[in-house]
Amino acid sequence: MDNKYTNNNPPGLSSSEDDSLAATGMRAADTLLRLVPMGLCIAALIVMLKNSEANDYGSVAYSDLGAFKFLVHANGICAGYSFLSAAVAAMSPPSTLSKAWTLFFLDQLLTYLTLAAGTVSTEVLYLAYNGDKEITWSAACGTFGKFCSKATASVVITFVVVAFYAFISILSSYKLFSRYNAPLPHPNSKQQLQTPVFHG
Amino acid sequence: MDNKYTNNNPPGLSSSEDDSLAATGMRAADTLLRLVPMGLCIAALIVMLKNSEANDYGSVAYSDLGAFKFLVHANGICAGYSFLSAAVAAMSPPSTLSKAWTLFFLDQLLTYLTLAAGTVSTEVLYLAYNGDKEITWSAACGTFGKFCSKATASVVITFVVVAFYAFISILSSYKLFSRYNAPLPHPNSKQQLQTPVFHG
């Protein structure tokens, strides 16, 4: 695929100070956009980790439910990845093609991971609030109301993270694929490389 | 964003027969790639729709569980969208920018929708197979084994659809964003539009 990568910049145009300012601004925006979900993931993780309730009917903790354990792990991975990718976005200005591909794939993966964790936990909460008579599952939130509302808070934060990552993966796919030429209806990208450019 | 759209093809190069053959081949591949998940979605939908079991302990149907109803709806939407988008991909050769944006957004949405339906149903199946002692939910698959294995089949097919749609959305984001110039380190895309091209 490397042979399709073209530098469309005419060599006659030197990069001005405006361009480097725009580059710095864009890098700062990219870094910030990754630090916000980092904070949100840590918040969702802590809210769920500290979530337990004991009363006369018994006790319940997040670790009693596989879905909530998955949510905690997913938020931990998300916080770590967000921090690392923010550091990468902030520190190294020359954006290479392999870096763009890596960020693209990992951003997509994180979106799918956080979405899966959020939906799985939503389903458990739905069952915990409503129960399911047909298969004799009782509504647990009647007796463990505080536990359920804290879990709901953690899940809502996780869905905000999903929205951030859906946006981040659109941006990183833009950054990756805008380096390539349009596949069709203009497939002669190789010929373009040899087209002489007249600098007026 | 329209002002950043550049046609990089020098007007001096006429599109050869090879190019139109490649265009036809690519359109056919795109159409096929959307017809396969259409078939899979219909299969997953039918398997789940016909899924019910009655025995001495009682009866259970897919409609008793919200997650499985969601799976059926998601697979129905997926089948319909796959068919429509395959028709769009097959019929109209001039790929406009708005068409590329529409396909890009809807493909992403379908990926998220099928992933959510698959994970939610997986969680219900996990609970149905294993139960959860702490919140007194019993394992239902001991008494409804046939129901659970058919539901598992439907969920597995749905995850194959997710893989197809993850790939389709990568392709459609490539098709969309390769029309734009790289944002950085070459941000002077506007100037490029006015660069005169010398036809050698």
Image (cartoon, coloured by chain):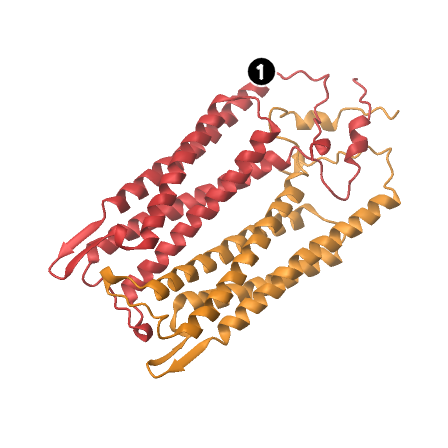
Chain colours: A orange, B red
Q: Is residue A62 visible?
A: no
Q: Residue B93: x and y, percent?
A: 54, 21
Q: Is residue B167 above or below residue A38?
A: above
Q: In this view, does A55 lie above or below B148?
A: below
Q: Which residue lies furthest to the left in this view?
A: B56
| Residue at 41 percent of width and 73 percent of height | A145
Q: Which of A81 and A147 is in front in this view?
A: A147
| Residue at 43 percent of width and 51 percent of height | B116
Q: Which of A67 and B25 is in front in this view?
A: A67
Q: Is residue A6 above or below residue A51?
A: above
Q: What residue type is disc 1 on?
A: Glu
Residue that badge 1 annotates: B17
Q: Residue A55: x and y, percent?
A: 38, 82
| Residue at 79 percent of width and 35 percent of height | A9
Pointer 1 indicates a residue of which chain? Answer: B
Q: In this view, does B135 lie to the left or right of A92?
A: left
* Kind of element beneath mark 1: helix
